Amino acid sequence: MLLHKLVSFLLIFTSLVYSAPLTCEQLTQPAERIDPRNLEGTWALIGGSISYLPYLEIFGQRDSALIHFPSHESVTNISYSRGLRLDGKCMYSTSNITLNGSRFTFDGTPAENSSCVFVRTSCSDCLPMLFDVDSGQRTHFYLFSRRRGLEQDEKNEFMEQVRCLQMPPPVFMDPTKQLCPWPEETLN
Ligand SMILES: *[C@@H]1O[C@H](CO)[C@@H](O)[C@H](O)[C@H]1NC(C)=O
Ligand SMILES: *[C@@H]1O[C@H](CO)[C@@H](O)[C@H](O)[C@H]1NC(C)=O
Ligand SMILES: *[C@@H]1O[C@H](CO)[C@@H](O)[C@H](O)[C@H]1NC(C)=O
Ligand SMILES: *[C@@H]1O[C@H](CO)[C@@H](O)[C@H](O)[C@H]1NC(C)=O
């Protein structure tokens, strides 16, 4: 009898632990230290939110976006490129960044002006990036993944994170829209 009670207690206790929703603090904490080798390659934009609504509207007009991290020699001084598709045209840009733990700053820009932190996620091939832009005037929060279409519960986690950050509800990209080609090349 006692054993039976103990077993049911353990079962209930374990299911409570497993189903306990993460707190906002847990949902928005920085990822474990980032290994640049895990960043290498291409990631597709899944969705994002921007604290300044007019920019969020513009954000929603893009067809697709990707980011690309080349393979790096250095573990701190790295770079990444963006490929943004808007009205059937691709625009590319590259930034040199300095990685420190799960944060990075843009080289040539004071750290307090613009920085990014990789946020924890339970999705193994996702990369949530939280940008502090224009000296704290705006926050941009983007979710990237190696996959185009995520499961609903993976999107829900991102929506929860956005809610925790008190940002406007995120805009999700249409996963059927074409990505810009990488390596960069001219499209016509
Ligand atoms: C490389 O990173 C360091 C910090 O780790 C930074 O101070 C420096 O500006 C970076 N170098 C270049 C060439 O940007
Ligand atoms: C990035 O750094 C490389 C050398 O590490 C340099 O050749 C290049 O001009 C830099 N790009 C920008 C946009 O600063
Ligand atoms: C990395 O970040 C930590 C804390 O965020 C800071 O104390 C340290 O000075 C930073 N290192 C570099 C090289 O910027
Ligand atoms: C950094 O921010 C300060 C204050 O907002 C601004 O005056 C300065 O031009 C910015 N610098 C860069 C390189 O963006």
Image: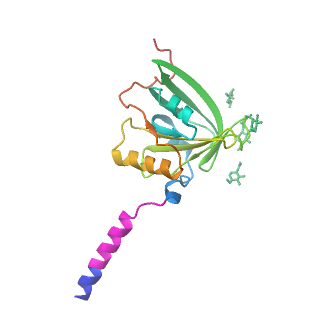
Q: Is residue 30 above or below residue 145?
A: below
Question: Which residue is more in the foreground, 36 or 175?
Answer: 175
Q: Is residue 111 above or below residue 5?
A: above
The magenta region covers: 8-23
| Residue 104 position by quadrant | top right
Q: Who's the residue at 52% across and 53% down the image?
A: 28
Check the picture and name the quadrant holding the N terminus: bottom left
Position in image of residue 32 (x %, y %): 54, 54
Position in image of residue 136 (x %, y %): 67, 44
Q: Is residue 173 visible?
A: yes
Position in image of residue 58 (x %, y %): 52, 28
9 in the magenta segment: yes
Position in image of residue 180 (x %, y %): 46, 23
Predominant SS of the magenta segment: helix
| Residue 80 position by quadrant | top right
Question: Which residue is more in the foreground, 135 or 77?
Answer: 135
Outermost residue toward the top in this view: 188
Q: Who's the residue at 36% across and 37% down the image?
A: 149
174 in the magenta segment: no
In the image, 132: left or right of 84? Answer: right
Q: Who's the residue at 42% across and 38% down the image?
A: 146
Q: Is residue 69 visible?
A: no
| Residue 53 position by quadrant | top right
